[in-house]
Image (cartoon, rainbow, N blue to C red):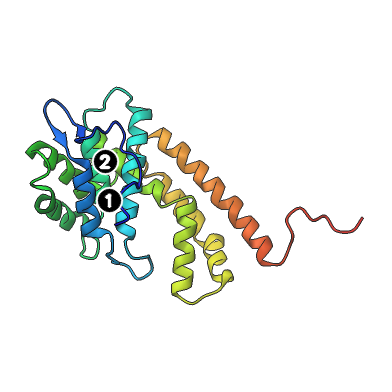
Amino acid sequence: MKEKGFWNHTKNTEAGLVDGVNNKVDLDQIQKVAFETMGHRQVNPQREPGYIYYHGQRVGKIALQLRELIFPFQDQDDGVILVGGWFHDVGKGIEPHWEYGALLVERILGEHCSVDQLEQIREIVGNHTLRKEKEYPHYVQLVQDGDILDHFGSQEIWLNFWHTAYHKQNLDYALEFYETRYQKQVVKVRELLNFEESVEFFNEKDRFVRSFVERLRKEGMGDLVGYKGKD
């Protein structure tokens, strides 16, 4: 199993991560459950098997990093933020996946979390796509932003390449997306972010993608970056 060692849990102890007074989330066990549930699933042929597991792992970690940056003294919900990130797409394959996922986590995690923790996790999963529709608690907003951020930067390029390969297309097909649709997507998604700090990270990811695509375009035409021609 490849889930072990994916990353070191923030503030995790040997038994788990303390989430409020006398409430402890067994992260290692829950991570095993997450891998068993999603580690090999392929719900979209244009993404690799297990994508929703590894995407969820990254989203959970991103959400915790945002929490530490934006709410440095509010660590009481770290367990539900992390687990909510892990399982936010567990319902993928049946739409609306956020509603189906909220039902699934109740069954999957019932024996691993307290009643209050499980309700918060259900709240994260059930609202992660319903951005800006109402005022959400910070633990929901953090996972919403983590979900967006993981889809951009190097991961966005990876998904584009996978999509291009799935359709048996060439480099021009991948570049056409950046020329015609990428900018509109960036503008639309940026407005859905909840925190200024998230926007800053998003903008950095966007700059990286644009820089990479420009180099990809040049090298795709056989140009050597930095070559100035004969004197």
Quarter residue 63 falls in: top left
Q: Amino acid at mark 1?
A: Thr
Closer to the chain start, of discs 2 and 1, is: 2
Label 2: state its secondary structure. helix
Residue that protrudes farthest toward the top in the picture: 73
Whether 214 is drawn above or below 138: the answer is below
Whether 43 is drawn above or below 144: the answer is below
Q: Amino acid at mark 2?
A: Leu
Whether 160 is drawn above or below 5: the answer is below
Which residue is nearer to you in this view: 162 or 182? 162
Which circle marks residue 220 in the picture?
Answer: none
Q: Is residue 182 visible?
A: yes
Residue beneath the point at 48% across and 70% down: 164
Q: Quick check: 105 left or right of 185?
A: left
Q: Quick check: 75 left or right of 109?
A: right
Q: Is residue 135 visible?
A: no
| Place of residue 116 in the rendered image (x, y in percent of width and height, measured from the top left) | 10, 36
Which circle marks residue 129 in the picture?
Answer: 1
| Place of residue 1 in the rendered image (x, y in percent of width and height, measured from the top left) | 29, 57
Q: Which residue is mark 2?
A: 82
Residue beneath the point at 13% across and 25% down: 21
Discs 2/1, front: 2
How many numbered circles are shown?
2
Give me the C-alpha separation between circle 2 and circle 1.
Answer: 17 Å
| Place of residue 42 in the rendered image (x, y in percent of width and height, measured from the top left) | 30, 67
| Place of residue 70 in the rendered image (x, y in percent of width and height, measured from the top left) | 36, 28
Label 1: state its secondary structure. loop
